[in-house]
Image (tube, grey):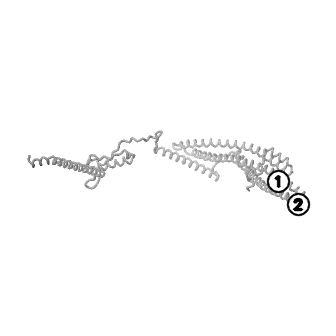
Amino acid sequence: MSESTMSAASEAPSLAVDSHTAAAEMHAQDSESDSEESEMAEASARDSAAEIPVTSNGEVSDSQEEHFKWDVKHIMTGGPTLKETRIVSSNYGSPTEGIIEADPYRGGLKNTQSGPVVITDDISKNIALEKLEQVKKWSISTYKCTRQVLSEKLGRGSKTVDLELESQIEILRDTKKKYENLLRLARQMAIQFYQVVQTQRQLGDAFGELSVKSPELHEEFGYNAETQKLLCKNGETLLGAINFFIASVNTLVNKTIEDTLIAVKHYENARIEYDAYRTDLEELNLGPRDAITIPKIEQSQQQFQIYKEKFDQLRGNVSIKLKFLEENKIKVMHNQLLLFQNAVSAYFAGNQQQLEQVLKQFHIKLKAPGSDGPSWLEEQ
């Protein structure tokens, strides 16, 4: 073989290798260009999917606008969460591009309601109607009672009077006023006597001190000191009896009698209501009877019967309370007046044993000095 033939034969494998290498490089470049084109296509699809298609006039098309509104409404009213939402970017250029699709919600939330809860306007309307009806009844009743009171004061209306019960009520009110005055005087006496006792204690201390510092008048100062201390002790005993008397009379006046007077007030209000509806029924009975007035008369008769029963019941309650109050008042005041008389007499007679016996008889215990805080007399 010639040298040219051998050189061509030796160069052929190298050319083949070069051609394969070039083909591989071209194939890699083509692959890279294809991948770049694919990424550009996907980016273009995403950009186009995020846009809202418009018409040639620059307005949103009806079908796209309706679909877009439905999607927004679905998202705003408890739609799927971000974890469950996926954006469809396939079918580029299709009518459904850029639409958010969501899988059915499969969350772990449980219904915490124990039963059906129904809230309707009917419930609130019924409540409002009931309140309105109550206000209406109250207004009518107040108007009739006010008219009755004015007519009684002007001397035009009739009034139901129980003479025996009314006289007992007047006596009770007068008794309360007198007992309040008695209570005021007893408190004033206790305050003044407490000051006397304190003065006697200070005077006894002064006599005792002078008895030590004045040897020539030791006995005279000593006798006076003992006398003042004894009077102070008896005065404290009498003061305990007076305070017990005040506490008992105060309970009688401001609790027992006051409770009865509250019942009397309820009775008088019931009497006004009874007379108001009685007068209303009498006026209807004096008028003509036709298809319009007969139902009114029947309704007025029913209301009159209700207030009549209430009035009779309260009148009976007041009569019973007045009876028991009178018995209780006599019993309480009998014991308290006896206590006051015996205690005052024993104190001014200088009978210490009798004074102490009075306190034992009525189970009165004197407080030890310094055992409790100052009494109400000390605070005056």
Picture coordinates of residue 377 (x, y %)?
A: 75, 54
Name the kind of residue labelled 1 in the image. Answer: Cys
Q: CA distance from mark 1 to mark 2?
A: 23 Å
Which residue occupies the extreme left position in the image? Answer: 2
Q: Helix, strand, or loop for circle 2?
A: loop
Q: Which of the two residues, 47 or 71, is positioned nearer the viewer here?
A: 47
Q: Tell whether 34 sits left or right of 118.
A: left
- Placement of 307 over or under 193, stated as above or below: above
Label 2, residues with CA under 10 Å away: few <14, some 14-19, many ≥20: few
Which residue occupies the extreme top position in the image? Answer: 115
Q: Which of the two residues, 239 or 130, is positioned nearer the viewer here?
A: 239
Q: Going 35% across and 42% down the picture, which residue do you hit?
A: 103
Q: What residue does disc 2 label?
A: 214
Picture coordinates of residue 287 (x, y %)?
A: 56, 46
Of badges 1 and 2, the one in the foreground is 2
Q: Which badge, 1 or 2, is on the more N-terminal residue?
A: 2
Q: What residue does disc 1 label?
A: 232
Q: Helix, strand, or loop for circle 1?
A: helix
Q: Which of the two residues, 283 or 298, is positioned nearer the viewer here?
A: 298
Q: Tell whether 323 sits left or right of 33.
A: right
Location of residue 205 by image quarter: bottom right
Name the kind of residue labelled 2 in the image. Answer: Ser
The reply to whether the C-beta atoms of the residues labelled 1 and 2 are less than 8 Å apart is no
Picture coordinates of residue 185 (x, y %)?
A: 77, 54
Quick one: quadrant of the C terminus?
bottom right
